[in-house]
Amino acid sequence: MYQILKKEELTANIYLMVVEAKRVAKNCKPGQFVIVRTDEEGERIPLTICDYDPEKGTVTIVFQCVGAATQMMAELQEGDVFHDFVGPLGCPSDLVKEPVEELKKKKILFVAGGVGTAPVYPQVKWLHERGVDADVIVGSKTKELLILEKEMEAVAGHLYVTTDDGSYGRKGMVTQTIQDLVAEGKHYDVCIAIGPMIMMKFVCLLTKDLQIPTVVSLNPIMVDGTGMCGACRVTVGGEVKFACVDGPEFDGHKVNFDEAMRRQQLYRTQEGRAMLKLQEGDTHHGGCGQCQS
């Protein structure tokens, strides 16, 4: 059993939990995720790791209530336990594979949208701990929906906050801030964008024009977390990939976002899932992580 040591409501329907999970915490790397279940009959919920402390044996998760399973999670209190807390899963961020001295030579930009701020934070923190500065753009619809601002400010080289309605920080979408920074003379060697699919799509369209290599995390399309359900099947550079076993990070300029978003809509119904399975045949599932188009 995995005890909840801390619970905090960050904003409406978005919660942070610190969970005791010693073996998971000792093996975590930025970019990975866990799968949790509230009880033996509970739904498997993939969640990107927001933070981890190997010494204390804790893992921090952030989630938004979007259905019955996450609502059940939100009802758990400090002292309660998760039945399952499996991980770390998925491939770590490519940044952790590069020599630190090479990373220090790069100008890195992170773009976070909504709950996507949570998986951006551990990557920026990991870089900060190694003396690597990164600029961060955090976007939300309103000031009230902004999360982890103080935590991000403590580890970012420069933090730019945007709100759609202009209630806080810069007014407008994150793409406008990217354009503004480039127009001001900023140069970036790589961009990492994590957030809603539609946000990542338009960030990638812009950065492709600006010739900024861009990595996206496709954690929003994961359901089962093992590749067996077929929910996170995505085409990247013309090849079939599965976000949970091949990712979650991919070259954003090669992702077919329109196809991925159409699949998300179809996957919500039993009839849609059956249609996808029929259309995609042997490539519908990706549990082996080796499926090809």
Image (cartoon, helix red, strand yellow):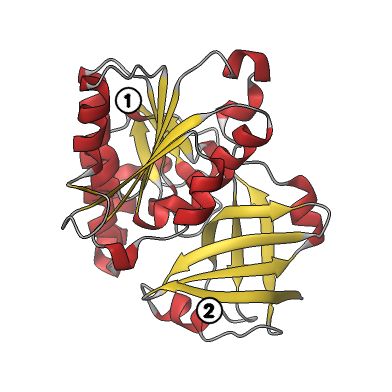
Tell me the SS state at disc 2: helix
Tell which circle, 1 or 2, labels the residue nearer the N-terminal end. Answer: 2
* Residue type beneath disc 1: Lys
User: Does any portion of residue 231 appear in the rendered image?
Assistant: no
User: Does any portion of residue 270 appear in the rendered image?
Assistant: yes
Q: Which mark is residue 73?
A: 2
Q: CA distance from mark 1 to mark 2?
A: 35 Å
Horizontal side of 260 relative to 90 (left or right) equals left
- CB contact under 8 Å: marks 1 and 2: no
* Residue type beneath disc 2: Met
State which mark lies toward you, 1 or 2: 2
- Residue 143 in the image, given as x and y percentages of width and height: 29, 63
- Residue 198 in the image, given as x and y percentages of width and height: 23, 46
Residue 275 in the image: above or below residue 120: below
Residue at left offset 52%, top offset 36%: 246
Residue at left offset 34%, top offset 33%: 235
Relative depth, front residue between 6 and 169: 169
